[in-house]
Amino acid sequence: MKFPASGERQRHRYIFPARAWFEYHCWESEDSADAELWRRTHQRVTVLRMLSPNESDFEMYEVQFADGHKAHVFADELMHTRKNFERPDYTGTGKIKIN
């Protein structure tokens, strides 16, 4: 099957469940619709499954955080190592911390 938006074939990068690091790559703001994900940036997640092309136009995965929160995240937000982080940490103040 192919993803409608990109035309890319569906492929699996993980054997589920898998462990990965999550880094939020969207609007870093408490006003963001995904602020719950921004607050969880740079946390370890369990990758539960890949979303099918019927569920998403892009390559996305369902993940679960240590606190039990489940979310759908883009493939480029999942890292094998913390060394791949590009964005600053969430500080809990609504501001970001530059390392």
Image: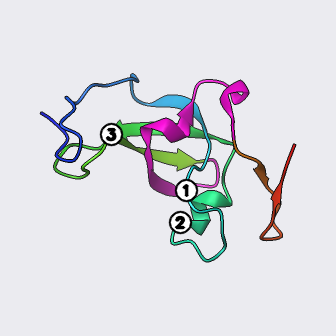
73 or 88, nearer to the observer: 88
Quadrant position of the N terminus in the picture: top left
Identify which residue is drawn at 19% across, 44% down.
53
Between label 3 and label 1, give the one nearer the viewer.
1
- Mark 2: amino acid: Asp
* Circle 1: element type: loop
Q: Confirm whether the magenta stretch covers residue 24.
A: no
* Circle 2: element type: loop
How far is the residue under mark 2 from the one under mark 1? 8 Å
Earlier in the chain: of badge 2 and badge 3, it is 2
Mark number, residue 34: 2
Identify which residue is drawn at 53% across, 36% down.
78
Quadrant position of the C terminus in the picture: top right
- Mark 1: amino acid: Cys
Q: Confirm whether the magenta stretch covers residue 77.
A: yes
Establish if 50 lies above or below 72: above
- Mark 3: amino acid: Glu
Residue range corresponding to the magenta coloring:
66-86
Establish if 39 lies above or below 75: below
Residue tagged 3: 59
How far is the residue under mark 3 from the one under mark 1? 15 Å
Identify which residue is drawn at 22% across, 43% down.
52
Is 96 placed left or right of 87 in the picture? right
Mark number, residue 26: 1
Residue 3, position in %: x, y?
Answer: 20, 41
